[in-house]
Image (cartoon, rainbow, N blue to C red):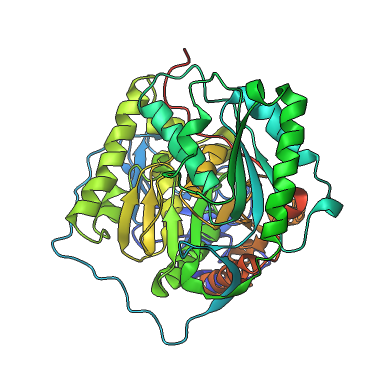
Amino acid sequence: MGLLDIAKLPTAENSAIRLHETDNVAIARVPLSPGATIVVAGTSVMVLDSVPAGHKVCLKAIGAGESVRRYGQAIGKTRMAIQPGQHIHVHNLAFEDHELELEFPTGEIAYPALPANMPTFEGFLREDGRVGTRNYVAVVAASNCAAYTVDWIAESFEAGSILPNVDGVVAFPHGEGCGHAIGPDTDQLKRTLAGVLNHPNIGAALIIGLGCEVNQIDHYLGPNAPRSKRLHGLTLQTSGGTRGTVEAARTRIKQFMEEMTEQKRVTVPASKIQLGLNCGGSDSFSGISANPALGVCSDMLAAIGASAVLAETTECFGAEHLLVKRARNRQVAEKFLGFIEGYKKYLRQFGGSFDDNPSPGNKEGGLSNILEKRLGAAAKAGTSPMMDAVDYAETVKSPGFVFMNTPGYDPVSLTGLAAGGCNLIAFTTGRGSAIGFPNVPVIKVATNSNTYKRMVDNMDVNAGRIVDGDASVEQVGKEIFDLCLRAASGEKTKAEVLGHKEFVPWRIGPVL
């Protein structure tokens, strides 16, 4: 049964959704009660257990130790024999890490030709050719010792003091920058903060330090700095302490804003969009509605030479075989697999596994393990070739679908995407994650109508209409694409209206 055939009112024929003809489970569209009958692909099944909406119900007898299949893929093995109509979840489905057969690309996929009728948006054209969807002044802490000060600086600018064509002054406080082991951890922090300072949505920036931390502000200044114009550095120890630094920063920011007010939005090709793809608070409907719809939007962006950047390495584990064969060439495939292997080593240091990723909320929403979660998560990247794979906060330079190595933890993942240059982010959620970013519009896509209605002030798009039968995946994907163009042109997202400004760099090493 296709999603377009689903009516709003539950009947035996539309109360459960089978996603692939080889699946031995269906997903309950509505809560199912014992004794109820569902009809899937012409076969009637009597429900034996209470099955919450979004959870799996068995369609055919599965022996102990046999595979449970969803999306046409194995998502684990049964702990015991399961009868048709029984609820399948963590109590009777075991996670199993298994080897996957990888099909590597043998040739080279070319970048697509740009369309004759290129969509456009109104953005801030930067000197390096990138385009900002916003025009902020950034005040970035070099370390935790300057975190309070950068917050004070940003908060001291009331709405009435912001000049035309300037979106505001935003702070980037964090708890890092000192007590780090010198090496990969400090290198990654520097890459992250440099990406923020030089972000296309930033028209001017200040880097603020205490003065004696590991992460010295001199790294970000000078002729070789990523941003040489409209960048200024201050330390509390040489600027009169906290109050003196706030006053000095305010003076410089006022000068920056006078320069920035001359910058105006201009019409630019939509190929200048770099859309970060993220999900959080996922549920079982994520892989049915919001993520496939976002995948349609991603494919539309890739077709016009824009970038769609898939994050969350933890949620690509188990989907390697699906993504490797989509790689532009063998080199990109190997880079992607290198990030997966590197993450496995990272987790082993702490005795963890990828299956630690699903949260209690994910499981309450019907996702039993990481294998099931990743099949839905990967759908955000659509069907386009994977043109590149980059490390955390590394600058995205390739058009099309790009993979970025990030944790699944939402604020850390969004920080990596933004530092890599994404000028928009699309975030799908089933449980209702409330998150944003200081200088990047975050578009929230709800996977189900209940969450959308409960959190309408947080959600921009209701992909639950797909499950309700009121819209197709393609229609909602086009809706997200159109909203991307409007948000890029200045329309505020719900996260922006609420003032969400989460910023959390990835700390990978020990605290010294």
Q: Nearer the viewer, residue 147 or 315?
A: 147
x then y, percent, for residue 499: 74, 47
x then y, percent, for residue 191: 43, 39
Residue at the bottom extreme, as displayed: 116
The quadrant in which residue 348 appears is top left
Residue at the top extreme, as displayed: 512
x then y, percent, for residue 186: 42, 27
| Residue drawn where x is 60% and y is 68% of the image | 123
Side (left or right) of 219 relative to 482: left
x then y, percent, for residue 214: 48, 21
Tell me if residue 123 can be seen.
yes
Q: Nearer the viewer, residue 49 or 298?
A: 298
| Residue drawn where x is 71% and y is 54% of the image | 257
The quadrant in which residue 406 appears is top left
Q: Nearer the viewer, residue 28 or 345?
A: 345
Side (left or right) of 340 relative to 381: left
